[in-house]
Amino acid sequence: MLLLLLQVLASCLWLGHSEVVTSFESSCPQFFFQNTPPNEALVPENPAWICQRYKNQYYFATLYDMSRRIPVYSAYIYQPGSGKRPNTWLIEPQVSVLSSYPKTMERERTLSKEIKITLEEIGKHQAVLQDYKNLTGLNRGHLNPNSHHSDFNSRTATFTLTNIVPQNEKLNGGAWNNYEQQTMIKNTKGCNNTYVVVGAVPGNNYIANGRVNKPSYIWASACCELNTKDRKTWAVIAENDRDEVKSLTLGELEDKLTQLYGRSRVSLFDSACPRK
Ligand SMILES: *[C@@H]1O[C@H](CO)[C@@H](O)[C@H](O)[C@H]1NC(C)=O
Ligand SMILES: *[C@@H]1O[C@H](CO)[C@@H](O)[C@H](O)[C@H]1NC(C)=O
């Protein structure tokens, strides 16, 4: 019992590493099929490329929008497993202020104590827990969900607010959850490796006194390697104010996102992933 308590304590005090990098290709390309991240059509004005690191290991990659304080997308490899849902929320010191801060993914309280940084400073470029309090009809929606990972550390690493958007509560617990659980299991039958990119399209509304954007859409896409030469893909999109998920081909999702983001043509995966 004491040992367990000590372990819990230790894991609360040291929560691992997370790193803001200059490009995914140079630091954590392994979360993208053929080491190829989505193209620049999704990059916002004020971006942070985060290789999500925890206990000295990279677990996934997130492109973060520091102005709207929500992720653009998270990219990861699908390796589902059962187990306990972690219950700790983390933030990234390096997004907050300067890269001289530790690479650690930390709890807010730990961070403000250890490096004497105020909550205001922490929240300058990223969402903090307070932003997600007192919401009505919305809750914290993971882009990269903890259930898509098989061990406790990789699940814990998903509990960073840089991987979270304000999501319609009904959608998060309803059709989106059904996609994450049932549909993904069905679609990944026969897949040797499945690369996933899940994102959120910024909307016109904000929560937390204008600090955090409420996305208009949430979307997901996957490229599965059936064997060394055959691949299949799929995609979904959901409006963030109704409990409904629409299925579409990868090509159709890219068309839709090209229109919604309104910059250049969106490409989510290397061209070896079929568009339909
Ligand atoms: C919580 O929300 C209610 C209703 O939207 C609002 O009146 C109240 O000021 C909010 N409280 C805080 C602490 O933000
Ligand atoms: C499955 O993927 C692994 C690498 O993750 C590779 O070594 C192996 O050859 C693949 N198997 C098939 C059947 O493609």
Image (cartoon, rainbow, N blue to C red):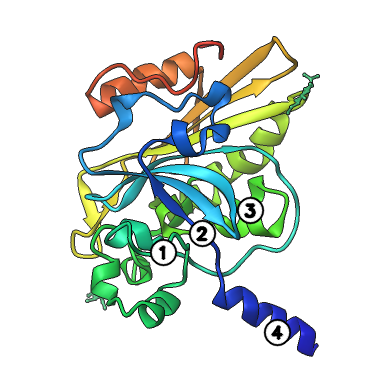
C-alpha separation, residue under disc 1 versus residue under disc 3: 20 Å
Would you say the residues marked 1 and 3 are in contact, meaning their CB atoms lie under 8 Å apart?
no
C-alpha separation, residue under disc 2 versus residue under disc 3: 12 Å
**34 displayed left or right of 199:** right
Task: Name which residue lies at 40% across and 74% down.
Answer: 111
Disc 3: residue Cβ within 8 A of ligand 2's nearest atom: no
Which image quadrant for residue 33?
top right
Would you say the residues marked 2 and 1 are in contact, meaning their CB atoms lie under 8 Å apart?
yes
Could one spot residue 119 in this view of the protein? Answer: yes
C-alpha separation, residue under disc 2 versus residue under disc 4: 21 Å
Element on which disc 3 rests: helix
Residue with the mark numbered 2? 17
Residue with the mark numbered 3? 154
What is the quadrant of the N terminus in the image? bottom right
Task: Determine the quadrant in which ligand 2 lies.
Answer: top right
C-alpha separation, residue under disc 4 versus residue under disc 1: 24 Å
